[in-house]
Image (tube, rainbow, N blue to C red):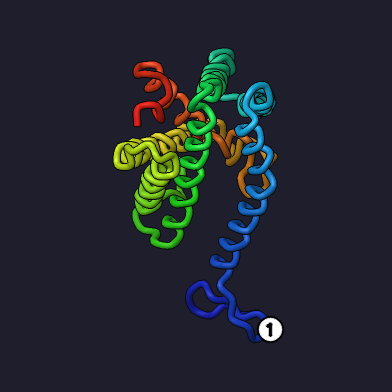
Amino acid sequence: MQAPSGNIIAVNGVMAHPVVDAGRGALTTRLLSAAVLAPPVLAAVYAGPPYFSILVAIGVLVMAWEWSRLFGAGKLFWPAGRFLWLAGGFLYIGVPALALIWLRADEDFGRGTVFWLLALVWATDCGAYVFGRWIGGLRLAPALSPNKTWAGLIGGVACAGATGSATAMVLGQGGVLTLGALSAVLGVVEQAGDLLESWIKRRCGVKDAGNLIPGHGGLLDRVDGLLAVALIVALISLAGDGSILRWL
């Protein structure tokens, strides 16, 4: 095996790009994990209470365990603030979880609201991943997440906005531009939630919160953006006339 110029390696006479191949392998793992996890989540959202509440409760227990591992004994930073960080996990995880349950409890718009939030978060993540790898360019926050780029952020936000507009069209209630614009803003919130968890993991000296989901790490690594978006949407809904979809 020889290594010619660049990142090309010749293996048995066949030219291969290890960086590209590794990226494709990671994407395949992510897609397989999503294919396994998405159906039960979507089914619980469709069914509503109590199934959705039970699913969220299970998720909270898993995330609480991952959070406790981040600040576990034997590898702590800021020992004097250990209790505050552990207690902060209840707010970081618990409040958005309650927000999700509350949003789904709306008899008229709960199902549509949570489906919209999930689609928005998934679209943002996928858009950021694809555009970030495709275009590359300037890093968004290299000290927190070296793989995130401005191109990825813009791509993720664009996908979030498109998802919002598509949701409004599917619902047939109007407000295509309104929900599209709001979804784009929430795409920024989703990425901010991702960066916040990255900052926490950096301070703890770990790459992932866990290893539960192949290609994604722990559950916290997968839903960090959803936690942020659910909280903001619940606050907006409380300040307004219930579910945001009711306004359209």
Residue 135 visible in the displayed image: yes
Residue at (54, 14) in percent of width and height? 84
The N terminus lies in quadrant:
bottom right
Q: Residue furthest bottom?
A: 13
Task: Depth check: give the residue in front, 146 or 126.
Answer: 126
**Residue 133 picture location, percent across and down:** 46, 59
Task: Depth check: give the residue in front, 62 or 124.
Answer: 124
Image side of residue 217 versus residue 148, left or right: right
Residue identifier under label 1: 12
**Residue 82 picture location, percent across and down:** 58, 17
Residue 198 visible in the displayed image: no
- Disc 1 on helix, strand or loop? loop
**Residue 91 picture location, percent across and down:** 52, 17
| Residue 23 picture quarter | bottom right
From what the image shows, is residue 64 above or below residue 38? above
For disc 1, the neighbor class at 10 Å (few under 14, some 14 to 19, many from 20) is few
Residue at (64, 27) in percent of width and height? 52
From what the image shows, is residue 158 above or below residue 179? below
Task: Depth check: give the residue in front, 139 or 23.
Answer: 23
Identify residue type, mark 1: Asn
Numbered label tally: 1
The C terminus lies in quadrant:
top left
**Residue 128 picture location, percent across and down:** 44, 50
Residue at (67, 21) in percent of width and height? 50
Residue at (63, 35) in percent of width and height? 219
Q: Residue furthest front?
A: 172
